[in-house]
Structure formats: C-alpha cells, structure tokens
Image (tube, rainbow, N blue to C red):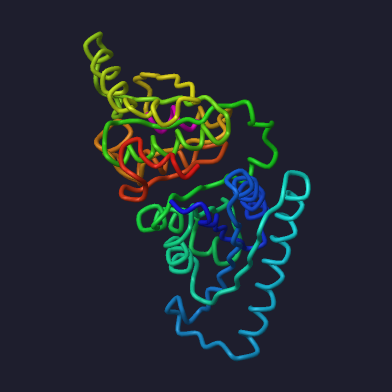
Amino acid sequence: MSATAPFVVGVDGSPASGTAVRWAALEAIRHHAPLHLVHAIALPLDRGSGVSVTPADFDAMRSAGDRVVTDAAGIAQEVAASTGGLVIDTYVLDPSPIPVLTERSDHARMIVLGTRGLGAFKRTVLGSVSTSLARHAHCPVAIIPEADADSPDRSGGPVVVGVDGSPCSGEAIHLAFDEASWRGADLVAVHSWNGDGHLTWGAHMDEEASALLAGSLAGFDRDFPDVTVRPVVTEVRPGKWLAEASGAAQLVVVGSHGNGGFAGMTLGSVSQAVLHGAEGPVVIVRRGLLPSGAAGAADR
C-alpha cells in the first residue's frame, strides 16, 4: 500500500459527515497521508429519474457542494491545528456517491463514511452506499457513527477484529494489526464458533475454536512485535459481540465475507449487524485488497 494513498471521505454537510471528517483527519495525520474530501452532487438525471437539470440548477448545486467541502475542510484544519500538519484536497463531482467513491477507492488507503447523512448520501440510504462500497471498493471502508463525536476518549481502547479462518478474515487481521501498531493499542482477536446460535457449547468446540484462532493469528507477531494480542473465543453471536465491543474499542475490523461464525453471514448479516449496532468506528475489509499473510508491514 502506498504511503501517500489518501483517506477519502464522502461529505454532505451533515453532523455525521463532520464526525467522519474528524475521524479521517486524525487517521490521515497518524498515517502521514493526505485527506481527500469528496462531495457528490448526485444529479437527478444520473439516478434515472428523467428530471432535467438546467445550467442554473447545476450551478446552484455545485455552489452548494463547494460550501459543503469548504466547511468540511475547515473541520479537518481544526483537527490538524492541534495535532499536526495535514494535506487536504476537496472535490465536488456530479455523479452519485457510489460510483464516485468506488472510482476514488482505486487509489485510496481507505474510504470513510458517516452514518445518518443527509442529501445524496442519505437519499441513497447509507446501508446501500456502505454495502455497495464494502463489496466493490478497492480499499477498506470505514463507517463512523455520528454518536462517536460524543463518545468518551477511545485512545486507551483496543482494536478489535473478528476472526473466522477465511482468506477475507486474514486480510481483516492484517489491517487490524497494522492499525493497532500505528495506535500503540492492544489487539483483541475474537472468534465466534456458534454464529447461528443453535449449536451446543462443548469442550471440543472450545478447543477447535481456540486452534482456529491461534492458526489465523500465527506469523503476524513477526511483523508486528509491538502489538499485544488478546485472543477471545465465544459462543455469542458475532455481530452482537462485535457491536457491544465497539463501545470501548478504538476500531472494529471485520471482513466482508467468510466461512461461518464471523463470515458466511456475508455483509448482509454480521457486517450489517455490526454497522447497525456499533457505537464506534467499523472498518470492512474485502478480500484481495491487502497483502496476503503477515506481509506488508514494511511501508509503515
């Protein structure tokens, strides 16, 4: 991953968008990366409504978009003023949010969205935007709840990652180790063997689950010797466990797809359950976005 790849934030002028900008600005500063603030005008014609847009309408929407990104840049500059320098670029584009952010994800370190947005990002429904981006974006996607702005300081909390042994889960683990290392945080790696809630807990299940978790984490300590790992095996439904853990975590990381437990439930189950119930930032990682295994720490 390029050290100069930007954090890209979809902004729309809502309080939730402002929360996402603050979070992304801190991340960009932490990673010595630029911050790109993107507003999508989302013309009615682009959405297939058949509504025509006059040049005056377009100019008005672009002017409104300019104000949105200017205000967002102001928020980011306030963050940078107290924590360090930050390169900020702003963009007002006329396609709808999903294609705009998907295209931007080609060269991004991470796409960042706030929940409860207004305007284009709300009209498409955050679930649709986040789900589509998590499935098709070419980088990890972070979803930041608006409530995170009023949460206590998370700096002492861990990074939490859901583990199920799948390739996608392996990439989520890599990103979680990387984030924990950058933050100087512990890593809580949790495996739920009973994702559907119908199996009976037993000693053999505990042993198998612990072995799977240990195998999934093997090797990462070589590239991330500074990260303290706390493995957890549970029979609690994964979405519920992760959503509850998000309250005290700096970050929760999950793969978009997997094998069961934390996976097979696809983005529509575990990831969606976490997104809807999370009290803190959640990052969704799709397979094929990160270096395999424990490689890739060298660019830190």
Q: Is residue 133 left or right of residue 42?
A: left
Residue 180 is covered by the magenta coloring: no
Q: Is residue 27 left or right of residue 131?
A: right
Where residue 164 sits, quadrant-wise, is top left
Residue displayed at 42% across by 45% down: 284
Q: Is residue 105 left or right of residue 90?
A: left
Q: Residue 124: x and y, percent?
A: 48, 63
> Image height check: is 261 above or below 148?
above
Q: Residue 139: x and y, percent?
A: 42, 53
Residue displayed at 53% across by 32% down: 246
Task: Give the magenta part as a residue range.
Answer: 238-243
Q: Residue 216: x and y, percent?
A: 30, 28
> Image height check: is 75 above or below 221?
below
In the foreground, 222 or 199: 222
> Image height check: is 20 above or below 178?
below
Residue 241 is covered by the magenta coloring: yes
Q: Residue furthest top?
A: 203
The rendered magenta stretch, by its main secondary structure, is classed as: helix
Q: Residue 74: x and y, percent?
A: 75, 59
Residue displayed at 63% across by 31% down: 154
Residue displayed at 48% across by 82% down: 45
In the foreground, 179 or 297: 297
Where residue 214 sits, quadrant-wise, is top left
